[in-house]
Image (cartoon, helix red, strand yellow):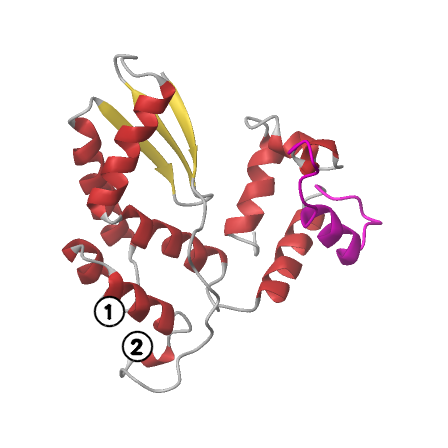
Protein backbone atom coordinates (compact mmCIF):
# COMPACT_ATOMS: atom_id res chain seq x y z
CA UNK A 1 0.00 0.00 0.00
CA UNK A 2 1.25 3.46 -0.84
CA UNK A 3 0.07 6.42 1.19
CA UNK A 4 0.40 9.83 -0.46
CA UNK A 5 1.63 12.34 2.06
CA UNK A 6 0.97 16.04 1.55
CA UNK A 7 3.93 17.98 2.85
CA UNK A 8 2.57 21.17 4.31
CA UNK A 9 4.69 24.13 5.25
CA UNK A 10 4.21 24.67 8.96
CA UNK A 11 5.47 27.25 11.41
CA UNK A 12 7.43 29.33 8.94
CA UNK A 13 7.14 33.04 8.45
CA UNK A 14 8.49 35.19 5.65
CA UNK A 15 11.08 37.08 7.63
CA UNK A 16 12.99 38.99 4.98
CA UNK A 17 16.70 39.73 5.14
CA UNK A 18 18.54 39.74 8.43
CA UNK A 19 19.91 43.06 9.63
CA UNK A 20 23.33 42.35 10.97
CA UNK A 21 24.58 39.24 12.72
CA UNK A 22 26.69 36.62 10.95
CA UNK A 23 29.15 37.17 8.13
CA UNK A 24 29.72 36.16 4.54
CA UNK A 25 27.10 33.93 2.96
CA UNK A 26 24.68 34.02 5.91
CA UNK A 27 24.51 37.80 6.07
CA UNK A 28 23.56 37.99 2.37
CA UNK A 29 21.05 35.15 2.59
CA UNK A 30 17.41 36.37 2.61
CA UNK A 31 16.52 33.26 4.65
CA UNK A 32 19.25 33.88 7.23
CA UNK A 33 16.97 34.92 10.09
CA UNK A 34 14.67 31.91 9.64
CA UNK A 35 17.60 29.51 9.35
CA UNK A 36 19.14 30.87 12.53
CA UNK A 37 15.79 30.57 14.32
CA UNK A 38 15.48 26.90 13.35
CA UNK A 39 19.13 26.23 14.24
CA UNK A 40 18.53 27.61 17.71
CA UNK A 41 15.35 25.62 18.36
CA UNK A 42 16.18 22.21 16.87
CA UNK A 43 17.76 19.48 18.96
CA UNK A 44 18.75 17.45 15.87
CA UNK A 45 22.49 17.45 15.16
CA UNK A 46 22.10 16.63 11.46
CA UNK A 47 19.68 19.51 10.89
CA UNK A 48 22.02 21.91 12.68
CA UNK A 49 24.99 20.71 10.61
CA UNK A 50 23.07 21.10 7.34
CA UNK A 51 21.92 24.63 8.18
CA UNK A 52 25.29 25.78 9.53
CA UNK A 53 26.35 27.37 6.21
CA UNK A 54 22.94 28.92 5.55
CA UNK A 55 21.93 26.62 2.69
CA UNK A 56 20.55 23.15 1.99
CA UNK A 57 22.47 21.50 -0.84
CA UNK A 58 21.18 18.61 -2.93
CA UNK A 59 23.71 16.28 -1.31
CA UNK A 60 22.74 17.40 2.18
CA UNK A 61 19.05 16.94 1.48
CA UNK A 62 19.67 13.49 0.01
CA UNK A 63 21.67 12.53 3.12
CA UNK A 64 18.84 13.77 5.32
CA UNK A 65 16.22 11.75 3.41
CA UNK A 66 18.43 8.66 3.69
CA UNK A 67 18.40 9.12 7.46
CA UNK A 68 14.61 9.52 7.41
CA UNK A 69 14.25 6.37 5.30
CA UNK A 70 16.52 4.45 7.67
CA UNK A 71 14.06 5.26 10.42
CA UNK A 72 11.09 4.21 8.28
CA UNK A 73 12.85 0.97 7.28
CA UNK A 74 12.50 -0.44 10.79
CA UNK A 75 8.74 -0.42 10.15
CA UNK A 76 9.14 -1.81 6.60
CA UNK A 77 8.22 1.58 5.14
CA UNK A 78 9.85 3.55 2.34
CA UNK A 79 9.45 7.22 1.50
CA UNK A 80 9.61 8.62 -2.02
CA UNK A 81 9.94 12.39 -1.92
CA UNK A 82 9.96 14.88 -4.79
CA UNK A 83 11.93 17.99 -3.98
CA UNK A 84 10.55 19.60 -7.14
CA UNK A 85 6.95 19.79 -5.95
CA UNK A 86 7.22 18.86 -2.26
CA UNK A 87 5.11 15.71 -2.63
CA UNK A 88 5.79 12.52 -0.72
CA UNK A 89 4.45 8.99 -0.78
CA UNK A 90 5.22 6.34 1.83
CA UNK A 91 5.01 2.68 0.82
CA UNK A 92 3.95 0.04 3.33
CA UNK A 93 5.85 -2.88 1.80
CA UNK A 94 3.74 -5.63 3.37
CA UNK A 95 0.44 -3.71 3.71
CA UNK A 96 0.55 -4.43 7.42
CA UNK A 97 -0.70 -1.13 8.83
CA UNK A 98 -4.06 0.55 9.05
CA UNK A 99 -3.99 4.21 7.89
CA UNK A 100 -3.83 5.58 11.44
CA UNK A 101 -1.02 3.17 12.34
CA UNK A 102 0.87 4.17 9.21
CA UNK A 103 0.49 7.86 10.03
CA UNK A 104 1.77 7.19 13.55
CA UNK A 105 4.95 5.49 12.27
CA UNK A 106 5.59 8.33 9.80
CA UNK A 107 5.06 10.90 12.56
CA UNK A 108 7.53 9.10 14.84
CA UNK A 109 10.25 9.16 12.19
CA UNK A 110 9.57 12.78 11.29
CA UNK A 111 9.94 13.79 14.92
CA UNK A 112 13.04 11.64 15.38
CA UNK A 113 14.91 12.95 12.34
CA UNK A 114 14.01 16.65 12.56
CA UNK A 115 11.89 16.42 9.41
CA UNK A 116 9.56 19.18 10.57
CA UNK A 117 12.51 21.54 11.01
CA UNK A 118 14.22 20.92 7.68
CA UNK A 119 11.70 19.84 5.03
CA UNK A 120 9.16 22.71 5.31
CA UNK A 121 12.06 25.18 5.29
CA UNK A 122 13.49 23.54 2.18
CA UNK A 123 10.09 23.77 0.48
CA UNK A 124 9.83 27.45 1.31
CA UNK A 125 13.37 28.21 0.15
CA UNK A 126 12.73 26.48 -3.18
CA UNK A 127 9.38 28.18 -3.72
CA UNK A 128 10.53 31.58 -2.53
CA UNK A 129 14.34 31.87 -2.79
CA UNK A 130 14.28 35.64 -2.34
CA UNK A 131 11.96 35.42 0.69
CA UNK A 132 9.52 37.93 -0.76
CA UNK A 133 6.25 38.89 0.92
CA UNK A 134 3.17 36.67 0.87
CA UNK A 135 1.46 39.03 -1.58
CA UNK A 136 4.41 38.99 -3.97
CA UNK A 137 4.71 35.23 -3.79
CA UNK A 138 0.98 34.74 -4.40
CA UNK A 139 1.28 37.01 -7.44
CA UNK A 140 4.13 34.88 -8.78
CA UNK A 141 2.17 31.64 -8.24
CA UNK A 142 -0.87 33.19 -9.93
CA UNK A 143 1.21 34.25 -12.95
CA UNK A 144 2.80 30.78 -13.19
CA UNK A 145 -0.59 29.05 -13.13
CA UNK A 146 -2.01 31.44 -15.68
CA UNK A 147 1.07 31.02 -17.88
CA UNK A 148 0.45 27.27 -17.98
CA UNK A 149 -3.23 27.70 -18.83
CA UNK A 150 -4.46 26.49 -15.45
CA UNK A 151 -6.39 29.69 -14.75
CA UNK A 152 -8.85 31.35 -17.11
CA UNK A 153 -7.08 34.10 -19.02
CA UNK A 154 -9.72 36.63 -17.98
CA UNK A 155 -9.46 35.99 -14.24
CA UNK A 156 -7.92 38.79 -12.19
CA UNK A 157 -5.54 38.36 -9.28
CA UNK A 158 -8.26 39.69 -6.97
CA UNK A 159 -10.74 37.02 -8.12
CA UNK A 160 -8.05 34.36 -7.73
CA UNK A 161 -7.22 35.49 -4.19
CA UNK A 162 -10.91 35.47 -3.24
CA UNK A 163 -11.24 31.86 -4.40
CA UNK A 164 -8.02 30.65 -2.80
CA UNK A 165 -8.73 32.51 0.42
CA UNK A 166 -12.27 31.20 0.88
CA UNK A 167 -12.95 29.48 4.19
CA UNK A 168 -15.01 26.40 4.98
CA UNK A 169 -18.71 26.88 5.68
CA UNK A 170 -20.71 25.48 8.59
CA UNK A 171 -20.63 22.01 7.01
CA UNK A 172 -16.81 22.08 6.98
CA UNK A 173 -16.81 21.35 3.26
CA UNK A 174 -13.72 22.33 1.32
CA UNK A 175 -14.52 25.58 -0.53
CA UNK A 176 -12.08 24.64 -3.29
CA UNK A 177 -14.16 21.54 -4.06
CA UNK A 178 -16.75 23.78 -5.71
CA UNK A 179 -14.34 26.28 -7.20
CA UNK A 180 -13.03 26.55 -10.79
CA UNK A 181 -9.89 24.82 -9.49
CA UNK A 182 -11.63 21.77 -8.01
CA UNK A 183 -10.13 19.31 -10.49
CA UNK A 184 -6.60 20.14 -9.34
CA UNK A 185 -7.46 18.97 -5.82
CA UNK A 186 -9.34 15.84 -6.89
CA UNK A 187 -7.47 14.31 -9.84
CA UNK A 188 -4.05 14.13 -8.21
CA UNK A 189 -2.47 12.12 -11.04
CA UNK A 190 -3.17 14.51 -13.90
CA UNK A 191 -0.41 16.53 -15.55
CA UNK A 192 -2.35 19.73 -14.90
CA UNK A 193 -2.55 18.94 -11.19
CA UNK A 194 1.18 18.29 -11.05
CA UNK A 195 1.84 21.62 -12.73
CA UNK A 196 -0.65 23.39 -10.44
CA UNK A 197 1.33 22.36 -7.37
CA UNK A 198 4.69 22.79 -9.11
CA UNK A 199 3.83 26.48 -9.44
CA UNK A 200 3.68 26.64 -5.66
CA UNK A 201 7.17 25.24 -5.24
CA UNK A 202 8.71 26.82 -8.34
CA UNK A 203 6.72 29.86 -9.49
CA UNK A 204 9.30 30.65 -12.17
CA UNK A 205 8.60 27.38 -14.01
CB contact under 8 Å: marks 2 and 1: yes
Task: Indicate whether residue 164 is drawn in magenta.
Answer: yes
The residue lying at 17 percent from left, 61 percent from top is 49
53 lies above or below 124: below
The residue that label 1 is drawn on is 53
The quadrant where residue 97 appears? top left
The residue lying at 24 percent from left, 49 percent from top is 114
- Coordinates of residue 151 in the picture (x, y in percent): 74, 44
Front residue (pair 11, 47) = 11
The residue that label 2 is drawn on is 25
Tag 1, which secondary structure?
loop
- Coordinates of residue 197 in the picture (x, y in percent): 55, 42
174 lies above or below 167: above
The residue lying at 55 percent from left, 26 percent from top is 189
The CA distance from mark 2 to mark 1 is 7 Å
Check the image and name the residue furthest to the bottom. Answer: 20
Task: Indicate whether residue 57 is drawn in magenta.
Answer: no
Check the image and name the residue furthest to the front. Answer: 170
In the rendered image, the quadrant that contains the N terminus is top left
Instruction: Write down the region rendered in magenta.
Output: 150-173
Amino acid sequence: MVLPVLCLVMGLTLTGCSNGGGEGQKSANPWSAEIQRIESRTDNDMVRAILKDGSITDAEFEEFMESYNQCLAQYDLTSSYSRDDGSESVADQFSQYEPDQLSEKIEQCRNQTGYFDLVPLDQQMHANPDNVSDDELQQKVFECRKRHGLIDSGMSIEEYKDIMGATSDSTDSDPLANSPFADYYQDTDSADTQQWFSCETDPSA
